[in-house]
Amino acid sequence: MNLNPKLIAQMRAATKNLMGHSPSAATKKIQDTLRGLQGRIPAGRSMAQTPGGVQDLLDQLIPGVMTGLDSSRPTATPLPGQFIDESYTNAAGTRSYKLYIPSSYKGQPVPLVVMLHGCTQHPDDFAAGTRMNELAEEMNCLVAYPAQSQQANSSRCWNWFNALDQQRDQGEPSIIAGITRKVMASHAVLDSQVYVAGLSAGGAMATIMGTLYPELYAAVGVHSGLPFASANDLPSALAAMRGDFRRPDIETRGLPIIVFHGDKDHTVHPANGDELIKRGARHLQSEPVTEPGSVPNGHKYTRIVHHTEEGTPHAEQWLIHGAGHAWSGGHSSGSYTDSKGPDASREMMRFFQTRR
């Protein structure tokens, strides 16, 4: 599908905007541009049905999106720990990853958090935006950032909507689990304090990892993500992102989970966050506790917590009023962040510490 340079320029501008400070404005621009694109698709066919249409669009859109983007953002403060490059290979493929080792780590057993980035992101970008490495320094834990490759997905999205990538010891779940186990083998990690979290496509993959490997991950953090097996191909993935998601035929256990979602998210519908909490709390008998709140000079939010009989938080939902598709409380040195929201990274770490 050949798109004219003006159209591609519009899409790239929208994507840069989305990755910066105005997700809602970018979403509108992308939607407007795509509506203009419809006239270029043969009658009776959708973009997904056009041979190579979606892939061609992504291949033309992604190159150049990152150009000049990092230079426009403030630089994150250097940290005293080590941020090292590693890689892992198994039968499903090879993925690189970065590992943050805090300066206080001297070989003593510590927790491990696995962070899965969103589309178009990479470990350095995700670490800068979430500020999770700063928390690792404060709380003395390791943080691993698996990196999706452009060979596996041209937009560097985790393939959460592929049936193969929703199966234990298959595809990308096997690679992420392998990275987790490699870090546990090479460093002293508390087996009962390994957690996984992610944003958007990474949030959907974090849910998959927690569902498929409950013995490996003690809890899951999902920001603007989707439920397990909510789609099995590209058309159903787009439907799930609109809030029309599939429900698996099998009963999955209620995951210990904390969920953040903006109620103005036009990329992944907030109904996905509701469904994540519904599944996580399905076995709990107690009434949830609802707490409204607000960030000074920032967003208001509603926090809903479902507790176990012992009083431990098991499923915790943060609905951020007025927020779009961006990491709440994140730093502007990373993409897809909203500094006006509650600190999702710190609240996830607080929730994780209750699951030991």
Image: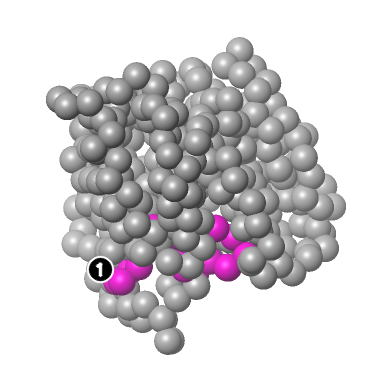
Say if 1 sits above or below 99 in the image. above
The spot of residue 151 in percent (x, y) is: 58, 25
Question: Which residue, given by chain and number where applicable, does mark 1 sit on?
Answer: 289
Magenta stretch: includes residue 323: yes
Magenta stretch: includes residue 67: no
Q: Residue furthest top?
A: 91
User: How are the residues colored?
Assistant: one colour
| Front residue of 118 and 133 | 118
> Does residue 351 show up?
no
The spot of residue 225 in percent (x, y) is: 37, 47
The overriding secondary structure of the stretch rendered in magenta is loop
Q: Residue furthest left?
A: 44
Residue ID at (47%, 43%): 5
Residue ID at (34%, 19%): 51
| Front residue of 314 and 311 | 314
The spot of residue 269 in percent (x, y) is: 26, 51
Q: Quadrant of residue 2?
A: top left
Say if 285 sits above or below 206 in the image. below
Neighbourhood count class around disc 1 (C-alpha, 10 Å): few under 14, some 14–19, many 20 upward: few
Q: Quadrant of residue 289?
A: bottom left
Q: Which residues are magenta?
A: 320-338
